[in-house]
Structure formats: C-alpha cells, structure tokens
Amino acid sequence: MKATESEFLSFTFTGKKVRWVQKCLDRFKYRILKLTSRRWGVSMQHRLRKLAQYIRGWMGYFRLSEYYRPIPLLDQWIRRRIRCCFLKQWRKPKTRFNNLVRLGVDKVNAAKIAASSKGYYRLSKTYAVQQALNNSYLAKIGLVSLKDLWIRFHHHR
C-alpha cells in the first residue's frame, strides 16, 4: 500500500478512486471455486441459485468500486466453470451427445465432443460447448452476470 492510499472496510481509496482490496477479490474467486466445484453433487438449479445469491451480495457490497478491468474476465471464468459442471453432469458420451444436439450443436461436432477424452475444463472452451451453452442460455437458466450487475449499478446513479 502506497503512502497516498488508505484502506477501510475492504476498500482501497487512492485519491478519488475507490477499489476493492485484492484479498477480497481472492476470497471471491475462492468462493466461486467452491460454488462451481464439479465435486459438489447438487442440482444445477440449486448451484445457480446459490451462485446468484453470492454474486449479487458481493456486487451489492462492492458496487462503489470503480474498478472494472477484472469484471469481464471474472464473468467469462464463471461461465466456463458452469459449462464444466454441465459436462460433468453429462458424464457418458451418449448423454453428452444427446444434450449437445438438443441444444443446437450439429451432430458431427457433438460426436467429437462426446467421444473426446479431454478434461471438462478444456472441453468447456470448445466452440461446440460454447454454442450449446451460450451466454444467453446460461442467463435464461439463472446465471447472474457480474458484468451486467456492475454496468447496472454504475449507469443508474
């Protein structure tokens, strides 16, 4: 911390800028890791509800922060973790194939993903999975966007 900075209630004040403390961001990431853990055997609906509660609460507290830079990257990371959870639920190749086709992926690409031996995190970055579980679909089933909350807070002052 520089001599011109002060820290109070998890915020850092530098001149006229307000930011959250890095330790709080690290705790946020850790909590998101826990809520999107593939080992946590809960329904997707429950997982998304708990995730939404946490993200809304965190953003409600830290909405004063003018620090936007990590928000889009955090949003992408959360969506990728949720896609991993879906792939883990669709463990068997047949289930993975059927769900990808049902969500609009062509059969050739769905078969490639279904037959792949790659890990869930790596597969969640593929075009076919991102096409099936796109941002609008994830929002429709209840995933809250950190970026949208930040924009809503900062443009409705």
Image (cartoon, rainbow, N blue to C red):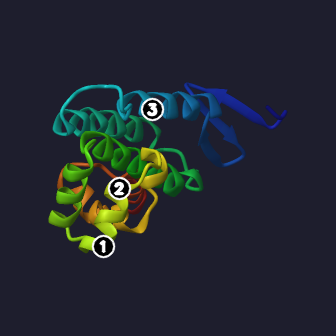
> Crowding at label 2, few (<14), some or many (≥20) Cα neighbours within 10 Å?
some
Query: What is the spatial separation of the Cα atoms under label 1 and label 2, in whole angstroms?
Result: 11 Å
Viewer-closest of 114 and 20: 114
**Residue 8 in sight in this render:** yes
Instruction: Tell me which amino acid carries mark 2.
Output: Ala
Whether the residues at callouts 3 and 1 have beta carbons within 8 Å, the answer is no
Instruction: Please tell me which of labels 3 and 1 falls first in the chain.
Output: 3
Query: Residue 146 location in percent, x, y?
Result: 40, 50
Image quarter hosting the N terminus = top right
Residue assigned mark 1: 108
Viewer-closest of 136 and 70: 136
Q: Residue at x 35, y 26 (%)?
A: 39
Instruction: Please tell me which of labels 1 and 2 falls first in the chain.
Output: 1
- Indicate whether 81 appears above or below 107: above
Residue assigned mark 2: 115
Query: What is the spatial separation of the Cα atoms under label 3 and label 1, in whole angstroms?
Result: 32 Å
Query: Residue 139 location in percent, x, y?
Result: 25, 57
- Judging from the image, what secondary structure is the residue with disc 3 in? helix
Residue assigned mark 3: 33
Instruction: Tell me which amino acid carries mark 3.
Output: Leu
Query: In the shown orientation, is residue 14 left or right of residue 148?
Result: right
Viewer-closest of 13 and 60: 60
Question: Residue 40, which numbered label?
Answer: none
- For the residues carrying marks 3 and 1, which lies nearer the camera in this image? 1
Whether the residues at callouts 1 and 2 have beta carbons within 8 Å, the answer is no
Q: Residue at x 35, y 53 (%)?
A: 145
Q: Residue furthest right?
A: 3
> Crowding at label 1, few (<14), some or many (≥20) Cα neighbours within 10 Å?
few
